[in-house]
Amino acid sequence: MTFIQLTLVFVILVLASGVLGWRRIRIPQLADGIRPRSRAIYHGLYNALWCALPMLLVVAAWLAVEPGIIRPAVLDELAANSALIEENSAFKYVEIKNIAEGVLPSALADKSVLQAVDHYRTLQQQSGIVLTILFITAGLAGLYLGYRRLGHLFPARDKVEGFVRVFLFVSASVAILTTISIVLALAFETLRFFQHVPVMDFLLGTKWSPQVAIRADQVGSSGAFGMVPLFAGTLLIALIAMLIAVPVGLFSAIYLAEYAHPVARSVLKPMLEVLAGIPTVVYGFFAALTVAPMIVDLGHTFGLNASSESALAAGLVVGLMIIPFISSLSDDVINSVPYSLRDGSLAMGATKSETIRKVILPAALPGIAGAILLAVSRAIGETMIVVMAAGLAANLTANPLESVTTVTAQIVTILVGDQEFDSPKTLAAFALGLTLFFVTLALNFIALHVVRKYREQYD
Amino acid sequence: MMLQTNKNKLRKRARAEWRFRSYGILSLLFASTALVFLVSTIVSSGHSAFFKTTIDFEFPLDAERLGIETPYTWENLWAGSYYTAVKQALYALFPEVTSRPDKRALSRMLSPGAELELRDYVIAHPDKIGESVSLEVPVSSDYDQLYKGHLPRTGKHTKLSAQQMEQFDRLVDEGLIHYRFNPGFLTGGDSRYPELAGIGGAITGSFYALLVCFLLSFPLGIAAALYLEEFSKDTRMTRLIEANINNLAAVPSVIFGLLGLAVILNVFGLPRGTPLVGGMVLALMTLPTIIIACRSSLRAVSPGIRQGALAMGASPVQVVFQQVLPAAMPGTLTGTIIGLAQALGETAPLLMIGMVAFIANVPATPLDSSASLPVQIYLWAESAERGFVEKTAAAIIVIMTFLILMNLLAVIIRSRTQTKVE
């Protein structure tokens, strides 16, 4: 059966069981008018759940098990008819699948492959029949088992609500599952990476050239996986970005919170939000098309030689992107400083700027520090701008006019396009990802901690 | 004496006040100038991509010269040699060009789209064969850029010879060159030729990815928010979940790309480069936004509603699903739209799950490989062809238009519910 047919069967069975369960209470069973414990709708829902869940389980199990049975069987068939080399099998299997599904023409394949294709088709058909039978049986059995439990005294509502609560809990746990799978996936691939490259070479090496030659006797066959230049580049760009974003963002926030006329505020605040809503790929295009050439020209007028993919261009634009982030967080923090502090300072004769500098900012400092840390973590994790504007040369330099590369840019460059999953080059991306994950995690953790602690102080 | 120093001090303080204030104004000025600069750069370099330059030809539709065999079935019409016909029509305008190299240089004026246009016309109007028709066909990218003024006529960046430009100018003078709206840009798929490339495929891919993202993250996000806000007790588990949600909201997007690659593609084996997988990754990224928005609007529902419903004998689950959640829906929807707008602009995770292949056709289902709008922008921005610069900027105009529309929708929903409460 096709996917659509299965879905139809599913919908019909679930609806039928729901209606049956609903009708169960509608039929006046007890003449003396005892009211049912749960309303008819809950009986319907309960029965529908009993019908739907087994069917979904069958499909999930089938999806998990089926490839594990068909694949070896087909490859055995192929091996019996031709000399199949072990490492070739994955490729051959894909070919067989594609021919069977009509993606590849069958005319070019040789006879042993065609036999395997036939075998694949029969197996696929058989497994489809088995699935259909199991699917319908599970649905009907669930329907019957659920229906048998219904009755005037059956607490259908409690059961349904219990299920709803479990479902809500499972949904909430998705966040934990995501974090766990991020850590596990990254850690697993990183361990495999460290089988090729020593940990210390990765953490402390100062040379990065992940291109591994195909043959062992070629020049540069080993590849170098020193993370230091990447982190230096990341930090350089983040530093430039913060040099722009912190003063601009902070002063914007101060002006908006303390000085601006409400009308001006209602125009300027959305403007900063627009800056926050622009996709990073747009910033990247802007950096590469406009900012980078501008810096090259500017450098020429001062007799400096700027690279067309300079760290300065990328850093400037990352800074531009971060401004609204800092300004809106600082705005919140400044606004949450109690008015009594402000009024007290003004009453003592301090000017507005003196109040801000000597009273409000010190009081808001932990919150602002938290905002800046969050912004640093943003700048470090920023990807598209650096991919498009910062280049790929892993230079270990502090000169902002030179080209540097970053952790995120390397991850994307390594993984875009074709990858083999055993080469240290591909695995290196996961090691970089794990490092990046922990660095940003630590920054966020500290920042949130600082912000929360500060909030408690005044609430 | 005393008075004098006090006055000086006051003046100094007033100056400091003025300085401090002007830092704020300068900062806002810097931010707004940058924004205006960015937007104007993109609009000025992108608006011309919505138009194409065409050349007006007189085609004698001669079945023999087009190499069309009778009967005029679709296959026979499709197999005609239209390229020669288009070239002949161009050469007819320049009888003085005779040598082969000159002819070759002249034929550079034609886009590969020219023969397709002629072919489509003939297939649509087989009855016109034997007559002479006038048809507008696109010129190739370099000439298109020249006509739009993006290509310098002199200097090292010129791509056309003086003769080629002179020939083109003559056609302009004769009124055969037209500047037309280019609907193909909005509906067509990607192409190797800038003048034929469109973002229809990318828009469809983005739409499917966002659809999958919405279908997954909206119910899951609401369910998670309901659990945390209405049913959870303050246990270790709850706090762990909350910490995880806050943390996921700040994880860099490349990490989600790595997750999609290692788990969704390599462990679950879902098809690479499809909107389905893209939508799943985006859903994980959107989930925290929706959960946070839904929680804060659940918190804003007045306790009177809850207590009233409980007093009427409703169970806690009934209270939540029949009273509280409907009341919190507008706020949740606003948050969801904003989350989806963020997801629409995400690029890096989609690059990593393989939505970067060159796909020329518009995807039919979420299971077909496809590009998406931001990825298309990235691909074109990285392309060396000059003609793609305006296409990139135009694609940015389109994505920004979608973002503005989505945010407007969010604002409308928010303001409408506010008036209702009042």
Image: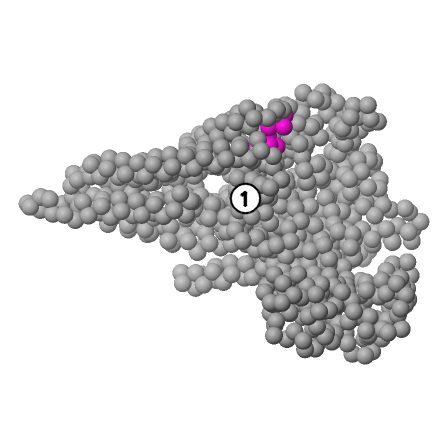
* Residue A324: % across, % down: 65, 51
- The quadrant the N terminus of chain B occupies is bottom right
Which quarter of the rendering shows the C terminus of chain B?
bottom left
Which residue does the image show at 29% across and 43% down from the upper left?
A48
Please say if B121 is above or below A438. below
Boundaries of the magenta span: A87-94
Q: Chain of mark 1?
A: A
Magenta: main secondary structure: helix
Q: Position of residue B376 (x, y in %)?
A: 66, 52
Name the residue carrying label 1: A102
Nearer the observer, A182 or A218: A218
Identify the amino acid type marked 1: Gly
Give the x, y percent position of residue B328. Answer: 41, 52
Residue ID at (72%, 75%): B60
Dot 1 lies on which element? loop
Residue B7 or residue B112, whichever sits in front: B112
Horizontally, residue A146 falls left or right of residue A311, namely left
Farthest residue to the bottom: give it: B174
Is B38 covered by the magenta stretch?
no
